[in-house]
Image (cartoon, grey):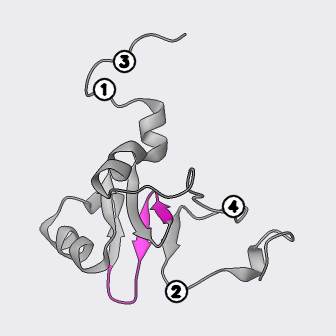
Amino acid sequence: MGRPTIPGEITPEAIKTAGYYKVEGDELLHAPNRVTTPTDTLTKESYSTPKDLAAQAKTGWRWFDTREAAVAALNFAGPGPDLTCVVEDCADRIEVGRVPTDRLPEDVPR
């Protein structure tokens, strides 16, 4: 057992799950640092700026400090934990509409 956490404390676990979240069908998508769409770019450095908040409303991606907060706020009741990236050396971002199939593991269907 580790030490108890202080309410509001940012734990290593919270840092790992902070980021942009979006529900699509029965999946909870997670982008820890950046989301790029054809018209907008959302970054962890600007998640609370008026421009980023407007882009979040338009794209459906929203910033949360933890996965648990995203699940609660987005009323997500889908299956199990999400997969952030299945590609080796993932660039910690999701580009909507672009799948890097040349870098997918061999067991992932293309």
Q: Residues within 10 Å of mark 1 (few under 14, many from 20)?
A: few
The quarter of the image holding the N terminus is: top right
Q: Are marks 4 and 2 in contact (CB under 8 Å)?
A: no
Q: Which residue is mark 1?
A: 9
Q: Is residue 60 left or right of residue 36?
A: left
Q: Residue drawn at (40%, 83%), measured in percent from left and top?
A: 37
Q: Percent position (x, y) of residue 5?
A: 36, 18
Circle 1 or circle 4, nearest the eye: 1
**What secondary structure is marked by label 3?**
loop
Height in image: 51 above or below 44? Answer: below
Residue range (magenta): 27-40
Between discs 1 and 2, the one toward the N terminus: 1
Q: Are marks 1 and 4 in contact (CB under 8 Å)?
A: no
Between discs 1 and 4, the one toward the N terminus: 1
Height in image: 64 above or below 46? Answer: above
Q: Percent position (x, y) of residue 91?
A: 58, 65
Q: The disc labelled 4 sits on which kind of residue?
A: Asp
Numbered circle sitting on residue 97? 2
Q: The disc labelled 1 sits on which kind of residue?
A: Glu
The quarter of the image holding the C terminus is: bottom right
Circle 4 or circle 2, nearest the eye: 2
Q: The disc labelled 3 sits on which kind of residue?
A: Thr
Q: Is residue 9 left or right of residue 86?
A: left
Between discs 4 and 2, the one toward the N terminus: 4
Q: Are marks 3 and 1 in contact (CB under 8 Å)?
A: yes
Q: Percent position (x, y) of residue 105?
A: 81, 68
